[in-house]
């Protein structure tokens, strides 16, 4: 028995040493390295890059090699791209768990940006769905650049003719998160009373419209300055949170999609019907280690003991749901909301604005070489290409 205790003690010590070593590796910041010389005899393009973690000051607007096109890829000339909190979490390398994917000490991939819209410039020999000249939108890491290459079978679809490149680039991360949160986790049904907390943000503006397309009675919660905006995109009722606390109103909802984490889980329970569903898309991002995962973890612990369902979720950026969103936009049932526009070289300023938390809808759009940024999904992601909105996670196919 004494030998067993000793063995367990040794194991516990080894585990503790491993955890401390991992913590030190995750929290270590390597210095920014010098920019390498652009490759000779190669086509170049302008792009935003970063070689160390930190504030927007670490972002550089540089010439890098233009991507090649593999047999199963399309090369897209980017006309617009949107800024997401995923970008600033990767830029800062926080919460530290992000570095499990982004890289220890410094980023493995110096490129940033995910959502894009543009024109197909070239296609690989095995590509059948696209041809040069097609207008497309989708998602791929490295979107803050003049060009991006993406596999034909991944997250890229034809752009609706009635949408601008700016509007299309504002869609993928935020709208996918809203759609899957409502449909897959929230199990939304016609006639249900649905509340969108944080209705004026990137995910929220899409969620209001998508919930209406399902035939729900939609209530949006936002600040005073955004009441008219939320009403204009179709909300049946709008609550100004500076004037009213919806968790104390006595009204019950069948489904709450929460983008901001402004109340405790027990307070949200008061606003749910006995069998209501609470979908966690976003929440407080404080903390250097696991940040917005705190609320989902609490929800998982609470759910077995209550009649309501508390559902954190992992959204997946995929071609099928992008097609559904495209059809909704083409039918006029979904319109992206754009807050501000920036040049590609002004991505640092766009991310500062995003970090300040003032943006409405999908806020920024890039338009190389004077790129504009559109949109803002508030996201954190611990795996490649993940994202969502303030803690909602979006798994990204490599």
Image: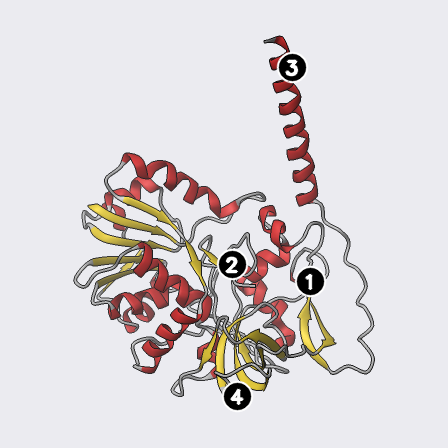
Which dot, 1 or 4, sits closer to the camera?
A: 4
The residue carrying mark 1 is 57
| x 44%, y 82%: residue | 159
- In the rendered image, residue 198, in percent from the top left (x then y), is placed at 36, 58
Tell me whether circle 3 and circle 4 mark residues in contact (CB < 8 Å).
no
Q: Is residue 337 above or below residue 55?
A: below
Residue most toward the top? 2
Which dot, 1 or 3, sits closer to the camera?
A: 3
- In the rendered image, residue 263, in percent from the top left (x then y), is placed at 35, 45
Crowding at dot 3, Cα within 10 Å, few <14 / some 14-19 / many 20+, comes out as: few
Image-based side of 354 in relation to 242, left or right: right
Q: Earlier in the sequence, mark 4 or mark 2?
A: 4
Disc 4 versus disc 2: distance between alpha carbons? 28 Å
Q: Is residue 244 above or below residue 118?
A: above
The residue carrying mark 4 is 131
Q: Nearer the viewer, residue 29 or 154?
A: 154
Residue 216's image quarter? bottom left
Disc 2 versus disc 1: distance between alpha carbons? 24 Å
- In the rendered image, residue 285, in percent from the top left (x then y), is placed at 50, 49
Badge 2 marks a residue whose secondary structure is loop
């Amino acid at each position: 028995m004494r030998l067993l205790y000793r063995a367990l003690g040794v194991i516990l010590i080894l585990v503790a040493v491993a955890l401390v070593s991992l913590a030190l590796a995750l929290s270590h910041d390597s210095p920014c390295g010098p920019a390498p010389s652009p490759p000779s005899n190669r086509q170049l393009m302008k792009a935003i890059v970063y070689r160390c973690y930190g504030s927007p000051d670490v972002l550089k607007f540089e010439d890098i090699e233009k991507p090649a096109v593999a047999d199963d890829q399309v090369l897209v000339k980017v006309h617009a791209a949107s800024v997401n909190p995923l970008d600033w979490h990767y830029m800062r390398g926080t919460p530290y768990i992000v570095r499990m994917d982004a890289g220890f000490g410094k980023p493995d991939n110096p490129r940033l940006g995910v959502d894009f819209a543009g024109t197909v410039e070239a296609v690989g020999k095995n590509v059948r769905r696209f041809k040069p000249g097609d207008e497309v939108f989708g998602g791929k890491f490295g979107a803050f650049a003049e060009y991006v290459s993406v596999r034909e079978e991944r997250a890229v679809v034809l752009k609706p003719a009635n949408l601008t490149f700016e509007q299309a680039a504002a869609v993928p991360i935020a709208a996918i998160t809203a759609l899957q949160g409502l449909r897959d986790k929230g199990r939304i049904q016609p006639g249900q009373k649905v509340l969108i907390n944080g209705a004026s943000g990137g995910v929220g503006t899409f969620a209001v419209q998508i919930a209406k397309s399902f035939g729900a009675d939609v209530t949006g919660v936002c600040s005073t300055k955004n009441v008219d905006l939320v009403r204009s995109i179709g909300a049946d009722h709008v609550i100004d949170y500076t004037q009213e606390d919806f968790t104390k109103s006595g009204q019950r909802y069948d489904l709450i999609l929460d983008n901001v984490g402004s109340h405790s889980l027990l307070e949200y329970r008061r606003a749910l019907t006995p069998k209501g569903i609470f979908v966690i898309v976003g929440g407080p991002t404080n903390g250097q280690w696991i940040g917005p995962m705190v609320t989902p973890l609490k929800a998982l612990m609470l759910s077995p003991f209550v009649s309501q369902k508390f559902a954190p979720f992992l959204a997946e950026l995929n071609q099928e749901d992008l097609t559904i969103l495209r059809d909704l936009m083409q039918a006029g049932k979904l319109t992206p909301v754009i807050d501000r526009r920036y040049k590609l070289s002004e991505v640092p300023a766009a991310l500062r604005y995003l970090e300040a938390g003032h943006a409405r809808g999908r806020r920024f759009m890039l338009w190389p070489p004077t790129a504009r940024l559109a949109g803002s999904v508030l996201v954190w992601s611990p795996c490649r290409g993940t994202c969502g909105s303030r803690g909602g996670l979006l798994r990204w196919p490599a």
